[in-house]
Image (cartoon, grey):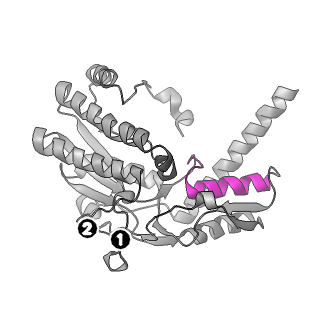
Amino acid sequence: NVEAIRNQLGLRECDVRDASSVRRLIADVRPDRVFHLAAQSNVLTSRHAPADTIATNVVGLVNLLEAIRESHPAARVLVPGSSEEYGLQHPEELPVRESYPLRPLSPYAVSKVTQDMTGLQYFESYHLHIVRTRAFNHSGPGREDVFVESNFAHQIAEIEAGLRGPELFVGNLDVVRDYSDARDVARAYILALESGVPGEVYNICSGRGRRIGDVLNSLLAMSGVEARIVVDPARLRDREALELVGDPTRFREATGWVPTIDFEQTLRDLLDSWRRRLALEAERARQQTV
């Protein structure tokens, strides 16, 4: 949550799609470590806006790497990819290793594959200190509700608060994904730049698959809410990997990283964060009417 630490940060705005803006920022700041997290990161959005997704994610990274190459080539750069790069994996290919084929199933996934390969190219061609990661699903407090588990938590918190009826809208609950806590993943990103091998790519994942329906059931159990489950066709993807679980061995051996936050705690913290958000919104609305 940036708001909680805003006064400890030096915030600078930059449009990564604007090469001159990126060059000025890098030349001015001269960063030692760069974690490139500026992206359009939603799969469904990418299906509606494929060109914008690819422009933001791919051109944005190229602008950043060019700026670093020109003015501060000593910087260490993390190019964070996604498990979506693997796309369609067959049951015999699970858990997925970094050497397995990439079969992207969305414009977002294509943009992340392109970022991945761009990072490799700039390492090979210009010897920049670039480490690539492929993070599998991760969540935690503050997660926006365009992501499935946070959307569930948001809906449950609204039902608790009496802001909606006892109906929960869902997509495909049989999909299986590999979840970690976002705070563990943030720690992994730091370790990747400190201990990862430049030019290498690493899975960041728990190695355990969780059915999305079970994630929903865990959130409901934490709340005590009883709701009718409604499948919303708009939440269904035309084509997606039904099961995607990663092998974290390479990253663990390189850095010693292991997840430390239990996923049940992740979900509790996520649900509590939505309760706090809704309570704060209600208080603001009350003050405006006084």
Mark 2 residue type:
Tyr
Crowd tier of the residue under label 2, counting other residues whose Cα lies within 10 Å: few below 14, some 14–19, many 20 or above: few
Q: Quadrant of residue 24?
A: top left
Residue drawn at (68%, 43%), measured in percent from left and top?
277
Q: Quadrant of residue 91?
A: bottom left
Is 157 one of the magenta-colored residues?
A: yes
Residue 67, position in %: x, y? 24, 28
Q: Is residue 111 above or below residue 94?
A: above
Mark 2 falls on what kind of element?
Answer: loop
Q: Which mark is residue 69?
A: none
Indicate the quadrant containing the C terminus: top left, top right, bottom left or bottom right: top right
Alpha carbons under labels 1 and 2: distance apart: 9 Å
Mark 1 residue type:
Gln
Q: Quadrant of residue 124?
A: top left
Residue drawn at (30%, 21%), measured in percent from left and top?
20
In the rendered structure, which disc, 1 or 2, sits on the residue that comes first in sequence?
1
Residue drawn at (64%, 58%), measured in percent from left and top?
152
Residue 62, position in %: x, y? 26, 35
Q: Is residue 5 above or below residue 273?
A: above
Indicate the quadrant containing the N terminus: top left, top right, bottom left or bottom right: top right
Q: How many marks?
A: 2
Is 216 one of the magenta-colored residues?
A: no
Q: Which mark is residue 100?
A: 2
| Magenta stretch in the rendered image | 140-161
Q: Is residue 245 above or below residue 77?
A: below
Query: From this viewpoint, is residue 85 visible?
Result: yes
Residue 250, position in %: x, y? 25, 64
> According to the image, label 1 marks what residue?
89
